[in-house]
Image: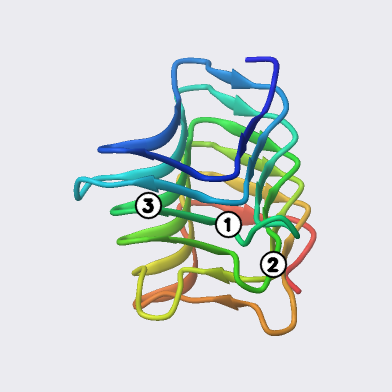
Amino acid sequence: MTGAITNENHISGDATGILLVSSGSLLNGITNNGFIVGNDGIGYGIVAANNSEILTGIDNGSEEGNGSISGDDTGILITDSYVSGGINNNTPDSLITGGQTAIALFSDSTIDGGINNSGSIGGEGLAEYGIRLGSSSEVTGGLTNEAGAVISGNNTGLLLEGNSVIYDGIS
């Protein structure tokens, strides 16, 4: 898809709000100022899987709206895929959360441009894991948690496992 996905209202699905699979490509990213929701107990807000790519990033919240990305299981799942432009949770009231994990990277996935948080990733008492990186996944551009922002999980706020790496530091 050569355009962008811009949501000012509500995108939801019984399983997934936005799904890219099997080498799916979104060239101008996702901007969310509304709600992106995956329901049904196993739901995902946004998924990029099986060699898919989201270029120019995922932006949640702006001066036009706070933005909420959530799934009954995971808010944002990137598995065997690539995101450039980072994941940006832009306002103090922006939320990325899930019943299990807010943001998950697995299977050699990459986020290029970092994870930048000005709001809440995980959410008070919501997700088991705020950010979970596994299976040789990597974040380049670092992890930035602005003053007053929160990355939290009922179990763990930030989990790196299985040879995963955050390049360029945590601040």
Identity of the amino acid at label 1?
Answer: Gly
Mark 2, other Cα within 10 Å: few <14 / some 14–19 / many ≥20: some
Mark 1, other Cα within 10 Å: few <14 / some 14–19 / many ≥20: many
Instruction: Check contact, mark 2 vs mark 1: CB within 8 A.
Output: yes
Foreground mark, 3 or 1, reads 1
Residue in the image at 80% along x and 59% along y: 168
Which mark sits nearer the N-terminus, 3 or 1?
A: 1
Where is 153 relative to 86, above or below? below
Inter-mark Cα distance, 2 to 3: 20 Å
Tell me the element at label 2: loop
Inter-mark Cα distance, 2 to 1: 8 Å
Residue denoted by label 2: 91
Foreground mark, 2 or 3, reads 2
Inter-mark Cα distance, 3 to 1: 16 Å
Q: Position of residue 130 (x, y in %)?
A: 47, 67
Residue 67 badge: 1
- Would residue 28 appear left or right of 19 to someone viewing this image? right
Identity of the amino acid at label 2?
Answer: Thr
Which mark sits nearer the N-terminus, 2 or 3?
A: 3
**Quarter of the figure with residue 150:** bottom right
Q: Position of residue 45 (x, y in %)?
A: 42, 45
Which residue sits furthest bottom?
148
Q: Which residue is nearer to you in this view: 91 or 7?
A: 7
Tell me the element at label 3: strand
Residue 74 badge: 3
- Would residue 63 appear left or right of 109 to someone viewing this image? right
Q: Position of residue 65 (x, y in %)?
A: 65, 58
Which mark sits nearer the N-terminus, 2 or 1?
A: 1
Give the quarter of the figure containing the C terminus. Answer: bottom right
